[in-house]
Amino acid sequence: MGTFLLLFLVFFPFLSAYFVYPLRRRGREYRNLYIRVIPGVELMAAVLLLAFPGTAVLSQVCGMGLRFEAGSLHTMLAVLSAFLWLMTALPCKEYFADREGVNRYYCSWLMTLGALMGVFLAADLFTLFVFFEIMSFASYVWVAQNENPGALRAGQTYLAVAVFGGMMLLVGLLMLHHLLGSLIFERMPGLVAALRKDQYGELFAAGLFCLVGFGAKAGMYPLHIWLPKAHPVAPAPASALLSGILTKSGIFGILVTSRYLFFSSADWNMVILVSGTITMVLGAVLALFSINLKRTLACSSMSQIGFVLVGVAMQGYLGAENALAAWGTVLHMLNHGLIKLVLFVSAGVVYLGTHSLNLNDIRGWGRNKPMLKTVFFIGAAAIAGVPGTSGYISKTLLHESIVEYIHELEHLGISAAGFQTVEWLFLISGGLTAAYMTKLFAAIFLERRAEKQKFNAREYMAPATQVTVGLTAFLLLALGLTPWASMQTIAESSSIFLRAGEHHGRIQYFSWINLQGALISLAIGAAIYVLLVRTVFRKKTADGAAYPDLWPEKLDLEDLVYRPVVKGLAFVGALCARVSAGIGDFLVLAGEKLLYLKAPGVFVPKKNENFGVYARKPKRFLIGETFAFDLTLAGVGLIGALTYIIFQ
C-alpha cells in the first residue's frame, strides 16, 4: 500500500495535467471542478501515507533509478504541499475568471505539484535532483503567466537562477557520487565517516556546490534576486505556492546536505549561519522599504527563510542536544507555508478589488471589510510571532536554540559574542517583521481611502476564497493555542528525519522567559514603526498619507552585479570566438594563397557581422551558425568514425 501511495502521489498529478485542455474544450466548469478535485485526491493520499509508510524503487529509470520514501519530514511536507495546493485551487475560479492562458497555468500547476512531491518524497539526492529540475522548469510558467514586460523579465531571472542553481547542484552531486559511491540518504553518514581526512576538502567543495543549487531555490542570499521580482508579477495563488512551499524544496535539500553530510562540521555550520543571518536581516529591510503589497510579502519570505536557515545551523552546533533547533526549523517551515497562504490570497483579493498592489493606490480599501481584515491580521500576527499564534511557537523554539548554545559556550568558558550578535539580529529581524506587517495592515485597513479607488461591490470575496483564508487563519490560531497537542507532535515526528536528539521534559511555551524574547521583538517593532515608518516611510498629505519609494534602484543586485557579469562573459566569449575564428581564417587563407594560386576567392574570411548579430538574421539561417549545430555535426562525425572502426 505504501509503495502504491508514493508512486501515486508523484505521478498522478503529471498524468492529470494532460486532461486540462480536453476538459476546457468541453466546458470551463468541468475544468474548474477538475483542478479542485485533483489536489483533494492528493491530500487524501498524503494523509493515508501517515498510516501506510513505505518505500518505492524504480530501478530501471534514469540509469541510477528513482527511490522514494515516506515517513517523518517526507510525509509532513507531502501533506502540507497537498493542503496548500487544494487551498489555492479554491479561489482560482474567481481570480482567473477573465484572464488568458489559464489552461497553460493549470497544466504547469499540476506538473509542479507532482515534481514537488517527487522532491519531498525522494530517498536519495539523484531522485531529488531529477524532480527538483522538473519543478523549476514547470513553475517558470507561473512567473511569466501574465506575459507583460515585468512578468517576462522576472521569468527570465527566475529561469536563469534555476538553470545556474541546477548546474551547480549537478556538479556537486557528481562530486559526491564519485567520492561516496552512493547518494542514498541513509547511507551517506556512514560513507562520510569512512572518508580519509585528506578527502574532506573535496567533500566540502561538493557540499558548497549543492548549497548554491538548493539555496538558489530557497531564496538564500546572494541568490535571492528572483524572489522579490517573481512573486509580485505571478498570480496570487501562484505567489502563495512559490513563497509558501516551493522555497521549502531548497530548504529540504539544504537540510539533507547539512544533516547527512556535515552533521557536526563547524565550518559548514558557520557558512549556513552567516548566510542565514544575512538573508534574515536583508529580507526584513527590503520588506520595510517596499511599497508594493506582494513585493513586501516576497521580501518577508526571504527573511523567514533566513530564520529557518539559522535553525539549520543551530542544529549542527548543538549536536545531540539539538531538539529545540530541529523542532523550530520544522515548525517554522510549516507555519510559513500556512501564513503566506493567508497573506498572498488576501493580497489577491485586494488586487481584484483595486487592480493595483501599490500601497498608495490600495490605501484604505479594506476599511469596511471585516472578514479580510481579520484573516490578514491573524496572518500578520503569526508571522510577527505574536503569542497565541503558531508563528510564536516556532520562533520561540528557534530563539531558545540560540540562547541554549550561548549558555553552553559560557559554561565552557568560551566567548559567545558572535552568537549573542546573532541572537540580537534575530530579535531585531523579528521587530522589523512586526513593523512592516503593521505598515501593511495600517495602510490597507486603517488609512483613509485613496481618492481614485472605484466603488467596491458588496461581495468583494468569493465564498471559496473565504474558506481558504478563513480555514487557514483558524489553523494558525488553533496550532498556536495547542502547541503540546498539535505542533510538538508534528515536530517530534518530523525531526526524526533530521537525526535530532531527544528532548526530556515539558516545554513551557508561555512561561515568562519564553514570552520575553517575543515581547522584545514586538517592542523593537513598535519602536521602528513609530519612530521610522510613521515619520520617514509615510508622509502626510491632504487626502491622508503617501508612501514614498525610498529604496535606491541602483542597489538592485541583479542590475548592479549579475547582469553586467553575464554581459561581460558573453562579450569575452564572443571575443574568444572571433579571435579563434580569425586564427583559423588566417591559416586557411594562407593555405589558399600558397596552394590554390589559380582559384582566388574560394575562401572568404568571416567578418564582424558574423558575430553577435543573430537578431538581424532570418531564423532559418541561424541554426547553421550556432555552437550547438557545430557540436551536432561533430557528434555525427564521431559516431560515423566509431561505426567505421567497429565494423572494420
Image (cartoon, helix red, strand yellow):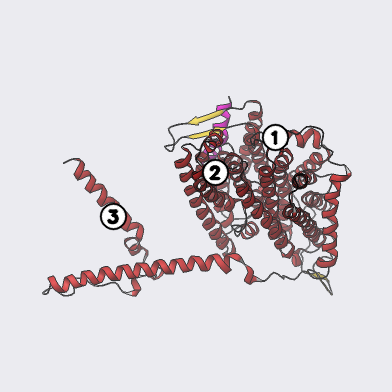
Q: Residues within 10 Å of mark 2 (few under 14, many from 20)?
A: many
Residue at 55% x, 61% y: name it: 152
- In the displayed structure, 25 sits above or below 287; it is above
Going by the numbered disc 2, the residue's amino acid type is Met
- Left or right, 143 with reference to 354: left
Q: Amino acid at mark 1?
A: Gly
Residue 619 placement (x, y as % from top left) = 37, 64
Measured from the top left, where is residue 82 in percent x and y? 64, 39
Question: Helix, strand, or loop for circle 3?
Answer: helix
* Measured Cα–Cα span from mark 1 to mark 2: 36 Å
Q: Which residues are magenta?
A: 1-23
Residue 322 is at least partly visible in this image:
yes
User: Do the residues under discs 1 and 2 have CB atoms within 8 angstroms?
Assistant: no
**Quick one: label 3, few (<14), some, or many (20+) residues within 10 Å?**
few
**In the depicted structure, whether residue 536 falls above or below residue 102:** below
Please tell me whether mark 1 sits on a helix, a strand or a loop. loop
Query: According to the image, label 1 marks what residue?
Result: 501
Q: Name the mark nearer the viewer: 1 or 3.
A: 1
Asked whether 177 or 542 is in front, the reply is 177
Do residues under tags 1 and 3 come within 8 Å of each other at their CB atoms? Answer: no
Q: Secondary structure at mark 2?
A: helix
Mark 1 or 3 closer to N-term? Answer: 1
Q: Is residue 253 magenta?
A: no
Check the image and name the residue furthest to the right: 512
* Mark 2 in CB contact with mark 3 (< 8 angstroms): no
Quarter of the figure that contains the N terminus: top right
**Residue matched to label 2:** 111
Check disc 3 and report the residue beneath it: 633
